[in-house]
């Protein structure tokens, strides 16, 4: 049996599956064409199928899918409630050796002014890469820029004044600021997050740092970070 375009007995059955980005774009194009080419039977059908509400739904789906496509494996966001809680996991590479170190000592205390064995008073400026994995070849997702200094006369407590600036996915251009004591001799330590920019504007939270590797001969270190940040929606 053949049905005409105006036959009311037509029943359309759709197996609903999440459309791909390309399929949504194609449907939107068909809608646009149907508005221009109303005189053909095919596009008359399309014009009836793709009403204004349908196009709005397509645009919403496109927006949602575009956002989902920018998700990153190293960062998760929970937008429920009045706050956004973001969890970040990455590795911090502090490299003092080689021809192109990412950390350079800029201040050394006068030897006649201290007897501390902790390097008390020394300061290091850094531009350290942040990566998804602990390997130096792992994908870079940002940089840690700032300085740390030895603030302990009897222990290896480093004062950290750092901005962690991200370059990956939806977090590109966003940053959080860390100001805290880093008890570097401890395997695991906690530090305070006091602010941020972009998606991390008005951030507050904490970072759990754990040493992954340390070369005692060069001072090169790789540190794993697990960061929890709360921001307002």
Image (cartoon, rainbow, N blue to C red):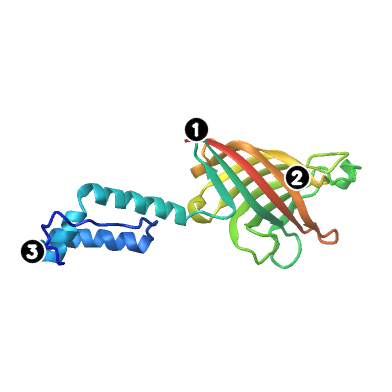
User: Which residue is the site of mark 2?
Assistant: 149
| Quadrant of res 138 | bottom right
Label 3 SS: loop
For marks 2 and 3, give the CA distance. 75 Å
Q: Which mark is residue 222?
A: none
* Residue located at (86% from left, 39% from top): 153
Which mark is first along the chain, 1 or 2?
Answer: 1
Horizontal side of 223 relative to 58 (left or right) equals right
Q: Toward the viewer: 154 or 80? A: 80
In this view, which residue lies farthest toward the top?
A: 82
Q: Which residue sits at x=27%, y=48%?
A: 56
Disc 2 crowd rating (10 Å Cα; few below 14, some 14-19, many 20+) is many
Query: In this figure, which residue is indicated by the disc labeled 3?
Result: 39
Which residue was labeled with disc 1? Answer: 81
| Image location (x, y in percent) of residue 61 | 35, 51
Task: Measure the C-alpha gap from mark 2 to mark 1.
Answer: 39 Å
């Amino acid at each position: 049996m053949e049905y005409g375009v105006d036959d009311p007995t037509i029943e359309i059955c759709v197996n609903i599956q999440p459309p791909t980005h390309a399929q949504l774009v194609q449907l939107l194009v068909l809608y646009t064409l149907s508005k221009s080419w109303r005189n053909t039977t095919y596009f008359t059908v399309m014009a009836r199928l793709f009403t204004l509400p349908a196009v709005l739904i397509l645009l919403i789906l496109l927006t949602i899918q575009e956002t989902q496509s920018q998700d990153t494996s190293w960062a998760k966001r929970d937008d429920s409630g009045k706050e956004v809680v973001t969890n970040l996991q990455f590795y911090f590479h502090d490299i003092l050796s080689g021809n192109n170190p990412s950390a350079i000592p800029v201040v050394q205390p006068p030897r006649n002014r201290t007897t501390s064995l902790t390097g008390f008073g020394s300061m290091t400026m850094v531009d350290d890469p942040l990566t998804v994995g602990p390997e130096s070849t792992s994908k870079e997702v940002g940089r840690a820029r700032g300085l740390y200094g030895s603030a302990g006369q009897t222990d290896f407590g480093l004062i950290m004044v750092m901005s962690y600036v991200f370059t990956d996915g939806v977090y590109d251009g966003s940053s959080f600021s860390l100001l805290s004591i880093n008890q570097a001799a401890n395997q695991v330590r906690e530090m305070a997050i006091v602010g941020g920019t972009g998606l991390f504007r008005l951030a507050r939270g904490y970072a759990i740092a754990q040493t992954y590797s340390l070369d005692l001969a060069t001072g090169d270190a790789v540190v794993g970070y697990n960061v929890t940040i709360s921001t307002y929606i």
